[in-house]
Image: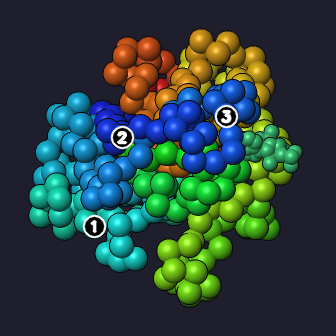
Amino acid sequence: MFSRIAGTGSYLPKKTLTNNDLAEMVDTSHEWIVERTGIEKRHIAAKSETTCDLAEKAARLAMEMAGKTAADIDLIIVATTTPDLVFPSTACLLQSRLGSTNGSPAFDVQAVCTGFVYALGIADKFIKSGSHKCALVVGAETLSRIVDWTDRNTCVLFGDGAGAVILEASKEAGLLSTHLHADGHYADLLKVGAGLSKNSEILKQGNAFIEMRGNEVFRVAVKTLGRIVDETLAHNQLQKSDVNWLVPHQANIRIIKATAKKLKMSMDHVVVTVDEHGNTSSASIPLALDAAIRDSRIKRGELILLEGFGGGFTWGSALIRF
Ligand code: ACO
């Protein structure tokens, strides 16, 4: 038994923030942001819009493409670092919104920017085990809520959005393999240094923000993503030239280009949305995947490599026959 992608969906909040808008808020420029990151604009959730709102819109589109109703879905996993509430999980809130009454398990996964790949890997294992047949896997974030809008080092990087995938049981191989990793020794390079049981006063003051040593994160990300490309191909006994599409986490165009170079892949076969979306953390990969499936760049039968890297550090990949 394997899992295969039956449908994808995504959603971006209406409001956009351009680099020029940001240049009016902090000491930066459109040219600096584009040169160092490739980002031109990002979407920002409205005040009343929550992570679950974005997740629901993406999920409904994925269900529509897959021809599935809430009753067909027997597993819901939401990858998010910005849940609506401490609990219940965003996945439980989403289950209720979708009108599901079949008692299917629903839970969140927290692996920051690698969250979607983690969630996909978990769903794949549920399906492969034969215990579940149809999973809704979502990456959704309102990162704008944990960005310090006075810190030019970080505020230019992030955006909000959601992407979703329906995975269903199949006799033919869709998801060929997933590879999940973490190294908590790097926790301090990229973090929000406040939570419910540590530095909670910072959280209560509304000052819990992303802190990042960008340069160091950049160096580890490039090295690590190169390694995971090799690991994934070796595991499947495939060559670089077998991969049709790279759908990377969208953090920085320079990191994406370095991974494409490692794969000896032309940028024409790399799905890039970082220019339009910025870094939407766990939403970035399913957003990019949905864009390239809906505009028919990615076709049935093609081989797709997903890869992500984020806080923790966490990193992972998935190789998919679409
Ligand atoms: N505008 C203008 N200047 C800026 C800005 C800005 N927005 N931000 C920083 N600078 C300045 C710095 O202050 C520094 O100035 P100084 O030399 O006078 O001290 C200078 O630019 C260079 O700073 P660096 O940090 O060395 O710049 P770098 O080339 O590394 O680019 C960046 C910074 C874009 C953050 C890059 O390091 C990066 O993309 N890092 C990886 C981010 C990432 O991949 N995160 C992973 C996942 S995120 C997640 O998990 C939530």
First in sequence, mark 1 or 2: give its number: 2
Give the residue drawn at x 32%, y 38%.
14
Residue underneath mark 3:
29
Q: Which mark is residue 48?
A: none
- Which amino acid type corresponds to the residue marked 1 in the rendered image? Cys
Q: Nearer the viewer, mark 1 or mark 2?
A: 2
Q: Gap between marks 2 and 3, in whole Å? A: 20 Å
Give the residue drawn at x 48%, y 18%.
302
305 vs 86, left or right, is right
Residue underneath mark 2:
15
Residue 177 appears in the figure: no
- Which amino acid type corresponds to the residue marked 2 in the rendered image? Lys
Depth check, front residue: 213 or 19: 19
Q: Gap between marks 1 and 3, in whole Å? A: 41 Å
| 286 to 108, vertically: above or below | above
Near mark 2 (Cα within 10 A), the count class, few <14, some 14-19 or many ≥20, is few
Residue 45 appears in the figure: yes
Residue 224 locus on image (x, y percent): 77, 44
Answer yes or no: disc 3 within 8 Å of ligand 1: yes
Residue underneath mark 1:
92
The C terminus, quarter of image:
top left
Q: Nearer the viewer, mark 2 or mark 3?
A: 3
First in sequence, mark 1 or 3: give its number: 3
Secondary structure category for the residue under label 1: helix
Near mark 3 (Cα within 10 A), the count class, few <14, some 14-19 or many ≥20, is some
| 158 to 104, vertically: above or below | above
Give the residue drawn at x 58%, y 15%.
269
| 268 to 262, vertically: above or below | above
Tell me the quarter of the picture where residue 85 sits. bottom left
